[in-house]
Image (tube, rainbow, N blue to C red):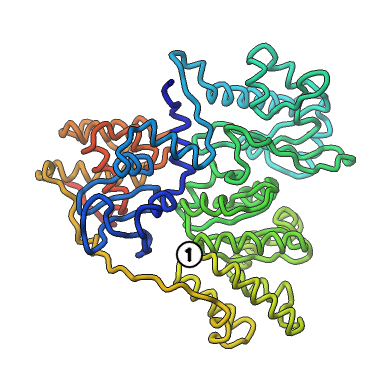
Amino acid sequence: MGRIAQETINRVLDEVDILEVISQYVDLKKRGKNYFGLSPFRSETKPSFSVAADKNMWYDFGSGQGGNAIQFLIEHERIGFAEAVRLLAKKYGIEIIEIGDKEQDNLYDQLYEIHELACIYFENNVKSAKASNGKQYLKERQFSDATIKQYRLGISLDSWDSLFKEVKGKFDEDILKKSGLFSESKKGLVDRFRNRLMFPFFNLSGKIIGFSGRTLSPDDDVKYLNSPETFLFQKSKIFYGAYQTLPNIRKQNFAILVEGQTDYLRLVENGFSNAIATSGTAFSTKHAAVLKKHTNRAILAYDSDDAGVNAAIRASYALLQQGIETRVLFFGNDYDPDDFFQKEKNSKKEFKQLIKTSLHPIAFIVKQKEILKQSATQRSLFVDECLGEIKMVSDSIIRDDLIRKLSNEISIPETEILNRFKSIKTKIYRPVDVEKSKIQETHYTSLSDKAQLELIKLGLHYPTFVKEIAIELFSNALLQNVMKTLIKNIDKNYTISQLLETTGSTPEERNLIASFAIHSPEKGVRIRF
């Protein structure tokens, strides 16, 4: 049995819901941002076992152990690393890719390469005389050259096999099929994307993993065509623009969600660098779970036609069920974001005002669906439907708030609403005050060691800070090794959970990083050597 590819390990750590994994063994309750329960590794009466869902990490304050989902299974089930990865991959439907002695045998590497070559080919077509209709469309949409270059927009020619000819002979046919860039026909493989404006999707490391193509033909019934599900591209979890704007979303702590690529690009061009798009695919609970790792606030800026309103309602429920504070922005005039910025004067200022006045999802539904004008029977059906969605919210505080909001919006006593809602009473834990818990730092007693620890902590939570750190400052061998790994991986956009697999060569290193991952550094910390 071969060695599991690092890309598979990263996918497991990125896609696995650590709360779902650990909740099978530990009864977890939310306290602040994190979740707490009794340690599964030792006997205790006050919960000191913590899970940081946004970082995909756990830490046991009593024993000083910590790690990611893989390490939890290793510790709890007493199994090996490879077996833990395989168990999680099987549960979440992630294909296991093994690598041999040669790097080129890695399937992921070849898939990344073919997507990069395809993107270069589409980009070059923008300058081709054969792509005049595509160039005309770009001109009409008025996207700047900088935007076209930064997001690597391209054009697929009106040909059955132009891309296939570019890559034929460079890859095995099996790789071409798995890429999703080609379809099978009686004559063999043909290009999947033809006569379309091409939008590449990037993963969080900046590698191209798929495409969305907007038709350039008025006779084409399929307006947008996405890559199919592949090893790299999972539509239910992927956002367009995530690679470029997730850092800003984390910094501003809210995301502006739009439906399509052109809407997203228009927002970014107008200075709203915390936008993100689902690109025509239905917003799923998996999308919400992915977004929750980066922010707990979202503004929906969907199209203002009936389809857009309905999509915004569905997305709102999915976001609320993940504990994401959600508001809905409404343009009116059947506008989408692209229309709004092209047709309205002072659109930047007006858009900011729309954000400020955006509505709570329940208020939005009541207003747009004119619930108060409906019959008693229809209003009753709406209440049942809304409560059905609220029941799927796991956080009791958020549930209670939504019930109160529903009561206020439709002027029905809260007690009446509560009678319809069967709540589940849960045991309330009183966790230990982890803020007062001290990380075991028996080996780090000097002022210099403590300063090095703070630098590592800052580097974990603020990766750009790593570039400013001189490795010569680290006199402690173990801490120097940790910082070297942080510096080495700074441009790979690893999550802390993924980083742990490249950094934690010893249990001491892993537990140290896990302890720092649970809580952000204190503001205004002063570091002295």
Number of disc labels: 1
Using the rendered view, name the quadrant where residue 170 is placed: top right
Could you tell whether 423 is left or right of 387 in the image?
left
Residue 260: % across, % down: 69, 49
Q: Is residue 357 visible?
A: no
Residue 199: % across, % down: 68, 37
Along the viewing direction, whichever of 46 and 221 lies nearer the viewer: 46
Give the residue at x 51% y 58%.
Answer: 254
Along the viewing direction, whichever of 172 and 164 lies nearer the viewer: 172
Along the viewing direction, whichever of 278 and 343 lies nearer the viewer: 278
Residue 395: % across, % down: 45, 66
Give the amino acid at mark 1: Ser
* Figure check: 255 above or below 443: below
Give the residue at x 11% y 45%.
Answer: 442
* Figure check: 489 above or below 403: above
Q: Which residue is mark 1?
A: 394
Using the rendered view, name the quadrant where residue 412 is placed: bottom right
The N terminus sits in image quarter? top left
